Amino acid sequence: MPFRPVESEKLSAAVVRQIEELILRGILQPGQRLPAERELADRLRVSRPSLRDAISQLEKQGLLVPKAGAGVYIADVLGSAFSPALVELFARNDEAVFDYLSFRRDMEGLAAERAARRASDTDLEVVQAVFDKMEAARGKRSAEEEARLDAEFHMSIIEASHNVVMLHMMRSMYQLLRDGVFYNRNVMFKQQTSRADLLDQHRAINAALQARDPKAARQAVETHLDYIETALRHNVRTAAQEEVARQRLDSLGTATRSVPVRQGKTG
């Protein structure tokens, strides 16, 4: 028979499982500090020795990182998704940004479709709350804050799709975006027209999700990312044209300086 004796689980093992689950679900995020030992032990209702044992195991697994005098932090497990050499290649390749957007279009379109079908009411409340912040931020005219909320809005949709592999993969992708590897998101919020367009696009995404319309949610995400791609291609083309114009101007200035100035005759 396949049965085995039932053994009681050590408290430290239960703590390990709970923290692992919180990291897996993206609730505890890289760089986040755990509460102080006494407070965390009280919350978990375990002894401090049991908590220390659990934290030690998680540190060995590479999920937690102790910092002298500062506490224990969630490890930056996303940092290994792309090697530094590959990140540098991304940064030097102009077409990588458009491959990145194509990837996001496919993944986020799928995530929005899944979220419209599978998200709980609480998941959709989170999406709505982030969008409400986006609307409120528009009046502050802070490109940095709008860019941050933009990323938070998209991640809330990924989270609502309830696919942990997609969650961590897309978090890694957004980290590259935050680090400016692909493009500076703040650029998208500088012009009044583009800012209004972007907010309208996010409004359409949110409306489709709140209506639980999978097809409309996916279409709204794809329309939004198509807009970003078009805007970025326009920026690349404009920058290239400006460089040519500057070269012409420099050439004209050189030519002018190279023409000898005739001295008038005297006497």
Image (spheres, rainbow, N blue to C red):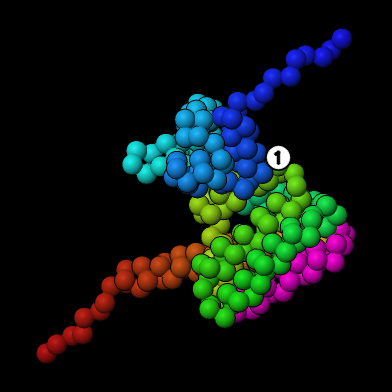
Main secondary structure of the magenta stretch: helix
Q: Which quadrant does the N terminus fall into?
A: top right
Q: Residue at x 37, y 44 (%)?
A: 70
Relative placement, left or right, of 188 versus 247 is: right
State the image quarter where residue 115 is shown: bottom right
Local crowd size for mark 1, using a 10 Å CA cut-off: few (<14), some (14–19), many (≥20) = few
Relative placement, left or right, of 165 versus 52 is: right
In percent of width and height, residue 217 lies at: 82, 61
Asked whether residue 95 appears in the rendered view, the answer is no
The verdict on residue 214 being magenta is yes
Q: Residue furthest left?
A: 267
Is 89 drawn above or below residue 192 in the view shown? Answer: above
- Identify the magenta region: 192-216
Question: How many marks do you count on the picture?
Answer: 1
- The three-letter code of the residue at mark 1 reads Val
In percent of width and height, residue 95 lies at: 63, 50
- Residue to which mark 1 is pinned: 165
